[in-house]
């Protein structure tokens, strides 16, 4: 059986849209048809916003859940290995499969896409939170205790602020990853820029614009979080790799 | 999708699709699925993934180890390790198909772009993080640079390197699922061709891709355990306790 791009049609059943911008370039499927891009750029606005919502909601939800888990496991350290394992198992399931495996449970739609993306973001963020909290120097904690802090004061006023660089580093990795993974969220019926890529996957200009928008979004969000980190923890610039 | 608990039926249909060839409303009497086709696509998927993984290892391990040993190119190694995450795999494979063309070799190139970075970066970081005292001790015992890399630094860096190898392998297996766009019939064919295989075929493809990834992950976890020097394991257990 030969699988051609035409076979992919039913997921991609939008008619070939107006390519009149520069007909020759489009007919030859040139490297990048600037005229067409200028005429058709508006069609990418809505998918870009959808993509942004998918990423924003998922990273924020992932952050909140990870924070909850970190709070739980911080004073109950035996919880850390099961939490890491539970969130990690999920990470070995390729996203292309995970979006589809959720369909029988939650149906097609934005929610399904967000659930999958949240799961991926969550594990990256949680790991970095644990690393950050573990790396707080014992001397700093001792100093806090010496000043008469309770456990909860120590957490909120010493340990958490000192972990901000690692936490934001995790947030940045999670955000950049989520932007890329969200380009497969169309498989769960969640829209986003992947829909545009897939609809005309053999038209170079289209793939370059939609794929390029993904990359630009990842870089822009990464930069925004870097700025946030400088504001939130001006005393230290962290560098964490996972 | 169907009523509550419909998921059991959906997964049942998918398993049936894997086991026996099915007719569906799209195929016009032609049967799709079944163990023979599943086996064929699985073999293709494995062949493509392993070719890419072998090349990625042959390329990333020595370069990462040498850069890490001499401590050069840190900025490049780290930024490569961070930037692959921004690449949308669907667009990458589509662009490879559009600009370089179809074929096994071209698909392998696409897989390398996502497979090499985590292995290279983790090898660099792993080797770099080896205790300098251990390296000095080895040097004092008269070891050459090559000896230090292969007999001191790489063994001590196994946990970090293998975590990169695992990430790289998962990337490769996941991206190989998009192979049908470049004419490589992998398990992703079931996922991407809903109009040939139907809903049950799409779900079957997802089950198969996820299972393959988990099996490889398990295998690599076992390999990591075998490759990790006994002393490192003991030190890790102490640290965990």
Image: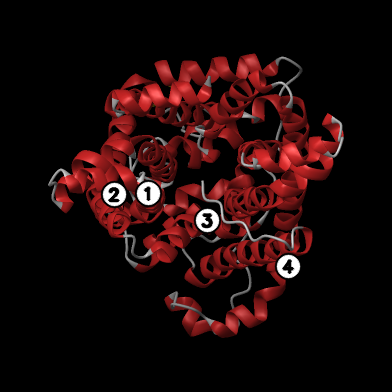
Between marks 3 and 2 in the image, the one whose residue lies nearer the viewer: 2
> Alpha carbon of mark 3 to alpha carbon of mark 4: how far?
18 Å
Q: Are marks 2 and 1 in contact (CB under 8 Å)?
A: yes
**In the picture, which quadrant includes the N terminus of chain B?**
top right
Classify mark 4: helix, strand or loop: helix
User: In terms of sequence position, does the residue under pointer 3 or pointer 1 come before the other?
Assistant: 3
Residue where numbered disc 4 is placed = A45
Q: Which residue is the site of mark 3?
A: B88
Total numbered labels placed on residues in the image? 4
Vertical relation: B208 (above or below) A120: above
Query: Which one is in front in this view, the residue at disc 3 or the one at disc 1?
Result: 1
Residue B44 shows up from this direction: yes
Q: Which mark is residue B56?
A: 2
Residues at circles 2 and 4 in contact by the CB criterion of under 8 Å = no
Q: Are marks 2 and 1 on the same chain?
A: yes
First along the sequence among labels 3 and 2: 2
Residue A175, compared with residue B237, is above or below; it is below
Q: Position of residue A51 (x, y in %)?
A: 70, 56
The quarter of the displayed image where residue B69 is located: bottom left
């Amino acid at each position: 059986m030969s699988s051609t791009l035409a076979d992919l049609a039913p997921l991609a059943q939008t008619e070939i849209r107006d390519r009149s911008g520069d007909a020759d370039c489009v007919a030859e499927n040139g490297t990048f048809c600037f005229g067409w891009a200028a005429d058709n750029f508006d069609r990418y606005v809505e998918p870009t916003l959808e993509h942004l919502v998918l990423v924003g909601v998922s990273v924020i939800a992932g952050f909140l859940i990870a924070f909850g888990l970190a709070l739980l496991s911080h004073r109950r350290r035996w919880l850390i290995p099961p939490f890491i394992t539970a969130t990690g198992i999920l990470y070995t399931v390729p996203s292309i499969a995970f979006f589809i495996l959720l369909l029988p449970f939650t149906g097609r739609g934005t929610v399904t896409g967000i659930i999958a993306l949240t799961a991926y973001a969550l594990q990256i963020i949680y790991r970095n939170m644990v690393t950050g909290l573990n790396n707080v120097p014992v001397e700093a904690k001792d100093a806090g205790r010496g000043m008469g802090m309770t456990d909860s004061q120590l957490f909120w006023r010493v340990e958490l602020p000192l972990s901000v660089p690692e936490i934001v580093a995790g947030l940045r990795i999670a955000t950049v990853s989520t932007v890329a993974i969200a380009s497969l969220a169309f498989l769960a019926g969640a829209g986003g820029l992947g829909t545009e890529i897939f609809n005309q996957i053999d038209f170079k200009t289209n793939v370059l614009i939609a794929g390029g928008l993904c990359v630009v979004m990842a870089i822009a969000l990464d930069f925004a979080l870097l700025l946030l980190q400088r504001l939130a923890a001006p005393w230290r610039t962290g560098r964490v790799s996972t | 999708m169907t009523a509550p608990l419909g998921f059991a039926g959906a997964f049942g249909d998918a398993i049936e699709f894997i086991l026996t060839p099915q007719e569906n409303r799209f195929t016009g009497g032609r049967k799709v699925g079944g163990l023979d086709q599943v086996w064929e696509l699985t073999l293709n998927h494995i062949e493509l993934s392993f070719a890419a993984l072998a090349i990625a290892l042959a390329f990333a391990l020595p370069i990462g180890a040498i850069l890490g040993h001499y401590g050069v190119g840190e900025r490049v190694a780290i930024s490569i390790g961070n930037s692959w995450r921004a690449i949308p795999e669907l667009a990458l494979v589509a662009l490879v198909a559009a600009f370089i063309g179809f074929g096994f070799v071209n698909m392998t190139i696409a897989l390398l772009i996502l497979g090499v970075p985590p292995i290279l970066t983790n090898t660099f970081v792993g080797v770099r993080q080896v205790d300098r005292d251990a390296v000095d001790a080895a040097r004092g015992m008269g070891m050459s640079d090559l000896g230090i890399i292969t007999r001191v630094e790489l063994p001590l860096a196994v946990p970090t390197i293998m975590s990169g190898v695992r990430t790289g392998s998962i990337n490769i297996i996941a991206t190989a699922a998009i192979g049908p766009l470049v004419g490589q019939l992998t398990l992703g064919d079931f996922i991407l061709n809903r109009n040939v295989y139907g809903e049950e075929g799409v779900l079957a493809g997802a089950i198969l891709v996820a299972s393959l990834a988990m099996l490889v992950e398990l295998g690599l976890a076992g390999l990591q355990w075998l490759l990790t020097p006994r002393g490192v394991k003991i030190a890790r257990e102490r640290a965990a306790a």
